Amino acid sequence: MDNKGLIFIPDISGFTRFVNETEIGHSRHIIQELLEIIINANQTGLEISEIEGDAILFYRYGDAPNLQELYKQVEKMFWGFHRYLEAYDKRRICQCTACKSAIDLTLKVITHYGEFASYNVKNFSKLIGKDIIIAHQLLKNDIDHHEYWLVTGGLMKNISSGSLPEWINWNNSLKQTETGEVPFQYAYLSQLKDEMPLEPEPQLEIQSKVKVISLVKDFDAEINTLFYTMVNFNLRGKWQVGVQKTDEVSDVLLQVGTHHRCVLDKGVRIAYTSNFSYGPDKIIYAETEDNKTNSIYSTFEKIGEMKTKVTVDLYLKKNPFMVTMFRLMMKKKIEKDLRQSLENLAELVKAVKMPVEL
């Protein structure tokens, strides 16, 4: 039995189109995140032979596992994969094609039992054998959907009545290979996606707040370029009064919930992106202090092809004493700094060009 084992290949469908037709940097990061989620969902002692671009070659020597164990593994990887995509699609800030189309990525899983051997190349364990070739050939088939679980005959023997969900409907097919026909069965996973429990949305906004400052300024700039310039953490120190730099950003791709640190002339400020909505003519973006004492909302409204109105609203947590003290002691200075920041932004945006990736 030393040379027999399970071959388990999760494959992200749509990967080739995703990286060829969209912004490569963002797509590469999203795929990396998805592959890490699949790896972290390993609960059956699978070993990794290699990561093959859009797929992971897992294996495990020993007796063939029962189908219920395999299903639970497929379920965990599938749900982790789609939870990430659902959450990112709801929270993403970026409007590039890669980020907008990530939600359409799909996952299929090939499971095959057979003979293979391993050999080591430095720190990597490579697999060889005809069943490794067969498993990879099964990735290319005539199945007309992109989310399914494919199982070859050797594994179908280990199925007991009632061990799988009732909705699983097996379809029979054959794969013609150089060594002959390989029979397999497959089941679509669309029902599994419908049954996926979603994680609760985090409560990021201040529930009870009071507006203490509201400023309006018209910019001679295209709405998306202006928005990109304002939210880009690398540019904050160039226009925002009192800010030296912004660092320690928690996410590579900015999204609702992303934390960052502003290094100020006096001290530091920890904040996170707390609200976002996007339309071609109106964008709303908000950041909230980590201790939820204040929030700044920036509303961008298109008033011409190269004309954008920006409204900046500062809110404080509803506390009569703190609000009164702010108005008496701090409002005048902060309002002045915000006005100057907007003037600085108007000059900076003239030299900013929208990148391919947002």
Image: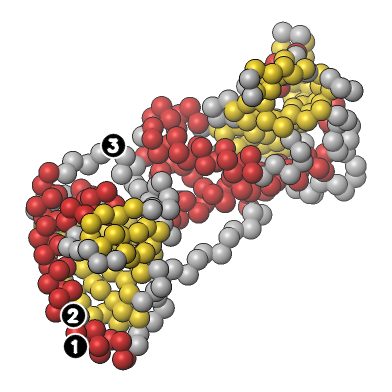
Q: Nearer the viewer, mark 2 or mark 3?
A: 2
Tell me the crowding category of disc 2: few under 14, some 14 to 19, or many 20 or more residues within 10 angstroms, Cα based: some
Q: Residues within 10 Å of mark 3 (few under 14, many from 20)?
A: few
User: Of the residues tagged 3 and 1, which is closer to the observer?
Assistant: 1
Residue 189 sits in quarter: top right
Few, some or many residues within 10 Å of mark 1 (<14, 14–19, 20+): few
| Point 17% across, 53% down: residue | 238
Tell me, yes or no, if residue 208 can be seen here: yes
Return the residue at label 1: 328
Work out whether mark 2 precedes mark 3 in sequence or the reverse, and give the earlier one.
2
Which of disc 1 and disc 3 is earlier in sequence? 1
Q: Quadrant of residue 198?
A: bottom right
Does the CB distance between marks 1 and 2 fall below 8 Å? yes
| Label 2 sits on residue | 331
Q: Nearer the viewer, residue 258 or 181?
A: 258
Q: Which mark is residue 173?
A: none
- Above or below, 211 relative to 130: below
Q: Which residue occupies the extreme front position in the image?
A: 266
Residue drawn at x 23%, y 60% is 243
The x and y percentages for residue 316 are 31, 79
Label 2 residue SS: helix
- In percent of width and height, residue 309 lies at 15, 61
- Quarter where residue 182 is shown: top right
Quarter containing the N terminus: top right
Q: Amino acid at mark 1?
A: Leu
Q: Is residue 142 visible?
A: no
Nearer to the camera, 242 or 312: 242
Q: Tag 2: residue type?
A: Lys
Mark 3 vs 1: CB contact within 8 A: no
Residue occupied by mark 3: 356
